[in-house]
Image (cartoon, grey):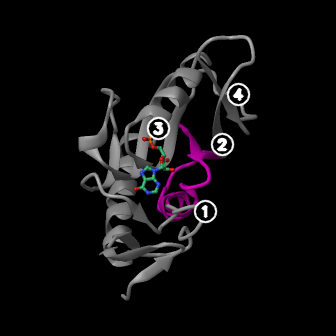
Amino acid sequence: MSLLKIKDKQFKPYISSEKIQEAVKNVAAKINAELKDEFPIFLVVLNGAFMFASDLLKEINFPCEISFVKVASYHGATSSGSVTELIGLTEDVTNRTVVIVEDIVDTGLTLEKLINVLSKKNIKQYKVATAFFKPSSLKNNIKIHYTGIEIPNDFVVGYGLDYDGLGRNQKNVFVLA
Ligand code: IMP
């Protein structure tokens, strides 16, 4: 693997595609064992989670539904504080087990907002599956049920993760050189 140049930054190889695939299979095995009787709905958080979701869901061996969502946060013109909206969820999630599929959990703030929205929808329970997790960056105590690979607080690209919109298509993960 060689260096990856994106705009003004150089990235060096960090996690190989083989290692990622092994981690994804481990996550899938846990989900297959724990959620097989739940008929869960997987909520894939776009854009970053598309590649993880594709690999993960091919390994899931029980019936499930898959939905693709975006989390949008904005400051309302009159209200104080920010409003979070979940775009793209058309399925009824009442009494369902919802598996949130994330690319990476960094501060955990995006996840927290998403969980707050979901918790108003009378779901049975939620589980979080993430390809990558930076435990030392976490700013809340949200539980991550299924983690592919834990990494230090480094900025990474590839396997769905981008720098300024680029690098998502790389099958290996790179870190800022
Ligand atoms: P959080 O809310 O801080 O947990 O981070 C949420 C989002 O920030 C992730 O879903 C990613 O889109 C982005 N992000 C966090 N860390 C990285 C990184 O190392 N590379 C690329 N994107 C990242």
**Residue nearest the observer in this picture, 83 or 176:** 176
- Gap between marks 3 and 4 measured at Cα: 19 Å
Q: Amino acid at mark 2?
A: Val
The answer to whether residue 160 is left or right of residue 88 is: left
Q: Residue furthest bottom?
A: 2
Q: Position of residue 130 (x, y in %)?
A: 41, 49
Front disc: 3 or 4: 4
Residue occupied by mark 1: 165
Residue at the image position 34 percent from the left and 39 percent from the top: 145
Q: Residue at x 61, y 54 (%)?
A: 47
Q: Which mark is residue 92?
A: 4
Q: Which residue is mark 2?
A: 69
Q: Secondary structure at mark 1?
A: loop
**Distance Cα–Cα, label 4 vs label 1:** 32 Å
User: What's the amino acid at mark 1?
Assistant: Gly
Q: Nearer the viewer, residue 76 or 26?
A: 76
Amino acid tagged 4? Asp
Residue 150 appearing in the image: yes
Q: Amino acid at mark 3?
A: Asp
Earlier-in-chain disc, 4 versus 2: 2
Q: Residues within 10 Å of mark 3 (few under 14, many from 20)?
A: few
Circle 3 or circle 2, nearest the eye: 2
> Do callouts 3 and 4 mark residues in contact (Cβ within 8 Å)?
no
> Which image quarter is the N terminus in?
bottom left
The reply, left or right, for residue 67 in relation to residue 33 is right
Q: Residue shown at 44%/81% (left/top)?
A: 4
Pick the front one: 7 or 173:
7
Disc on the earlier residue, 1 or 2: 2
Q: Residue 93, located in which quarter of the rendered image?
A: top right
Residue 37 image label:
3
Q: Give the mark nearest the N terminus, 1 or 3.
A: 3
Alpha carbon separation for disc pair 1 and 2:
18 Å
